[in-house]
Image (cartoon, helix red, strand yellow):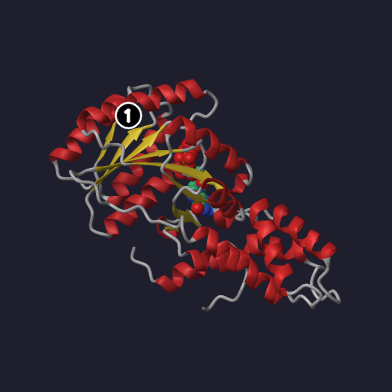
């Protein structure tokens, strides 16, 4: 399952093509006007907002253009390059892979997110990434609300050849997490990835469930959970921003993973999220296969969104 950097870059640029095409469509007609004027700047700003990149990014690109090109001709190449540069500035400080550094082990990673966000697949993909780095990985099926979620995670554990602690539907999530941490500690596991129920519908219930899990974890290891990773579906566009807002306060999110960037023209929302919340973004998903989740390079990501030349 090893993978070369080149093919990952192919998938990254391929996956984000819809997003960069949409940006291109929104900007169509704004190039090669005789000279850059205020009205064109307004239109560019609007186009960037409509492309989900967020108002702050739109304002900054406008600022850059008005400094450099006012009263001069604007080319598509130049505009895309400026957009890529500004996106890279925003993504560089937050593009941060999940590092395994907890001592004592295991590092406990809680994974949260609404149903359908790609949570289960992301857990499997993260587990695979850690296995490739030779870490011992265990899963815990803490989403006990749905039998399907437990079953799916078991299938992944089997496929990856890693242990899993799971209970029955309707079981006590905190109890499962307790057992998992105990087993992981006893067997020298490096990383324990915990699936949790992601029900946004009821904030109190979610909060109660998570604080119970936290209490139990804290009893075994005061530093746990070391990470609380929120999985977001990029196809939901601006709604992903609302989810961060809610989960940030209820679940003390420490970092993000954005999935399905390949299935959407709304990938710009990654930039808006980075700019608004400044939370670390650990990885992105650009496909359903196990190798389609990776930490990303801010420069590559920025160029993929802006649709600038592939090579450096
Ligand atoms: N195209 C694409 N599909 C993805 C990606 N990540 C997950 N998926 C798909 O999205 C669907 C939902 O993923 P799950 O991992 O089952 O999501 P979940 O949040 O656990 O959802 P529930 O099991 O319904 O709670 C599946 O069909 C996945 O294959 C991605 O990065 N790209």
Q: Dot 1: what SS?
A: helix
Q: Nearer the viewer, residue 67 or 141?
A: 67
Q: Residue furthest front?
A: 67
Quadrant holding the N terminus = bottom left
Q: Nearer the viewer, residue 267 or 10?
A: 267
x 47%, y 32%: residue: 198
Query: How many residues crowd mark 1 within 10 Å: few (<14), some (14–19), many (20+)?
Result: many
Q: Position of residue 158 (x, y in %)?
A: 29, 46
Q: Is residue 17 left or right of residue 229?
A: right
x 39%, y 24%: residue: 209
Q: Is residue 14 left or right of residue 145?
A: right
Q: Residue furthest left?
A: 186
User: Where is 304 relative to 195, above or below?
Assistant: below
Q: Is residue 53 visible?
A: no
User: Where is 48 relative to 190, above or below?
Assistant: below
Q: Position of residue 247 (x, y in %)?
A: 49, 34
Q: Position of residue 170 (x, y in %)?
A: 38, 21
x 58%, y 68%: residue: 85
Q: Nearer the viewer, residue 1 or 299?
A: 299
Disc 1 target residue: 214
Q: Position of residue 258 (x, y in %)?
A: 50, 50
Q: Is residue 204 left or right of residue 175?
A: right
Q: Is residue 31 visible?
A: yes
């Amino acid at each position: 399952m090893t993978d070369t950097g080149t093919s990952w870059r192919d998938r990254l640029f391929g996956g984000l093509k819809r997003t960069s095409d949409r940006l291109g469509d929104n900007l169509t007609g704004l190039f090669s006007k005789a000279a850059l004027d205020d009205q064109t700047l307004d239109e560019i700003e609007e186009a960037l907002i409509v492309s989900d990149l967020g108002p702050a990014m739109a304002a900054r690109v406008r600022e850059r253009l008005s400094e450099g090109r006012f009263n001069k001709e604007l080319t598509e190449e130049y505009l895309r390059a400026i957009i890529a540069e500004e996106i890279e500035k925003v993504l560089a400080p937050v593009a941060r892979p999940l590092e395994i550094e907890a001592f004592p082990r295991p590092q406990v990673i809680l994974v949260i997110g609404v149903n359908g966000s790609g949570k289960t697949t992301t857990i499997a993909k993260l587990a695979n990434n850690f296995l490739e780095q030779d870490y011992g990985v265990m899963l815990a099926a803490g989403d006990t609300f749905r039998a399907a979620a437990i079953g799916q995670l078991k299938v992944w554990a089997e496929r990856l050849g890693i242990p899993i602690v799971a209970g029955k539907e309707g079981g006590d999530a905190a109890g499962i997490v307790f057992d998992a941490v105990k087993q992981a500690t006893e067997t020298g596991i490096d990383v324990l990835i915990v699936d949790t129920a992601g029900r946004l519908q009821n904030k109190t219930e979610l909060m109660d469930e998570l604080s119970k899990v936290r209490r139990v974890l804290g009893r075994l290891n005061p530093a746990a959970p070391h990470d609380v990773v929120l999985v977001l579906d990029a196809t939901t566009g601006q709604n992903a921003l609302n989810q961060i807002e809610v989960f940030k306060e209820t679940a003390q999110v420490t970092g993000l993973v954005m999935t399905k960037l390949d299935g959407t023209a709304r990938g710009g929302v990654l930039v808006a999220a980075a700019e608004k919340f400044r939370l670390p973004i650990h990885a992105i998903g650009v496909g359903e296969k196990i190798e389609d989740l990776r930490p990303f390079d801010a420069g590559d990501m920025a160029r993929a969104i802006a649709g600038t030349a592939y090579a450096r």
